[in-house]
Structures are given as C-alpha cells and as structure tokens.
Amino acid sequence: MMHTESRSELPRMADIFKVLGDPNRLRILSLINVQELCVCEITKVLNISQSNASQHLAKLRSAGLVKERRNAQWVYYSLNPDAFPLIVKILESLPDVSGELKKINGLPDHPECKI
C-alpha cells in the first residue's frame, strides 16, 4: 500500500521520468556526474549546438536534477543527487561516458562559451 505522502510525489516523479526520456539529457547527466562542465564543454562532447544544450540543461534544472555554479561569465553544471536520489542508481546503469570527456581535454579554457 502506498503512503499518502508518496502519492503526492507521483506527479513530480512522472515529470522527472519525462525529462529522463531524452538520450541527450541522459548523456548530459552522465557527463556531469563524472565532472562539473560548462555549456561549451557539453556542446563539444555531445556535438550539439549551444542553444540545444542550453534547452536540455533548462529542463534538467527545472526538474531539479542539476545544480549550477557561476564563475565570471561561465556557468558550470553538476549533478544534484539530493533532488532525486534514484538518479544515482539510474546513472550507474548507463554506459560509461568518461572516455567522451577526452574531447575537451587540452581545450583552451572556454574559447567560445559566453553567457
């Protein structure tokens, strides 16, 4: 039997699962689970436009799954596991993306990333 407070969480959980239904958003979450990244780094790794990456990040932020930290004109994104603890288990079941981060190694700091 489901507790009353659990039932009240169902709409929020459904929204989170909808957000997780996109492969690019899952890859973003996997990447920022390994290390904090800015939009320009995410675009380089995923080979998507900055506006596309920003739209995905906005949805992840609205679901509470990512945190952001500002440093000068750059915004860095990291996973917010406290918002939805099950996300850690979900990410553990996804393919390892740490090799994809090699695409940003050696890049000059934020050459095209502007807010």
Image (tube, rainbow, N blue to C red):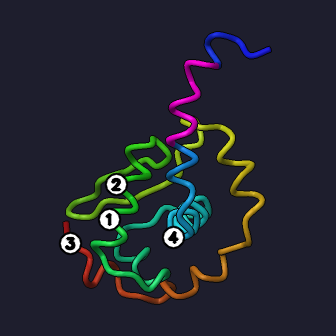
In the rendered image of this protein, does residue 51 appear above or below residue 70?
below
For residue 58, which numbered disc appears in the image? 2
Q: Earlier in the sequence, mark 4 or mark 2?
A: 4
Q: Residue furthest top?
A: 4
Mark 4 and mark 2 in contact? Answer it, CB < 8 Å: no
Q: Is residue 50 above or below residue 55?
A: below
In the picture of the structure, the residue carrying the numbered disc 3 is 114
Q: Which residue is mark 4?
A: 24
Look at the image and give the residue range highlighted in magenta: 7-15
Q: Are marks 2 and 1 in contact (CB under 8 Å)?
A: yes
Q: For the residue carrying disc 3, how many other residues have a C-alpha within 10 Å: few (<14), some (14-19), or many (20+)?
A: few
Say which label, 4 or 1, has the lower sequence index. Answer: 4
Drawn side of residue 102 relative to residue 1, left or right: left
- Kindly identify the residue that appears in the image at 65 percent across and 37 percent down: 85
1 and 3 marks in contact (CB < 8 Å): no
- Distance Cα–Cα, label 3 vs label 4: 21 Å
Of tags 2 and 3, which is closer to the observer? Answer: 2
Which residue, given by chain and number where applicable, does mark 1 sit on?
54
Tell which of 106 and 11 is nearer to you: 11
Q: Position of residue 1 (x, y in %)?
A: 80, 14
Q: Nearer the viewer, mark 3 or mark 4?
A: 4
Q: Which residue is rendered at x = 22% and y = 60% of the image?
A: 72
Q: Quadrant of residue 31?
A: bottom right
How far is mark 2 from mark 1, CA to CA? 6 Å
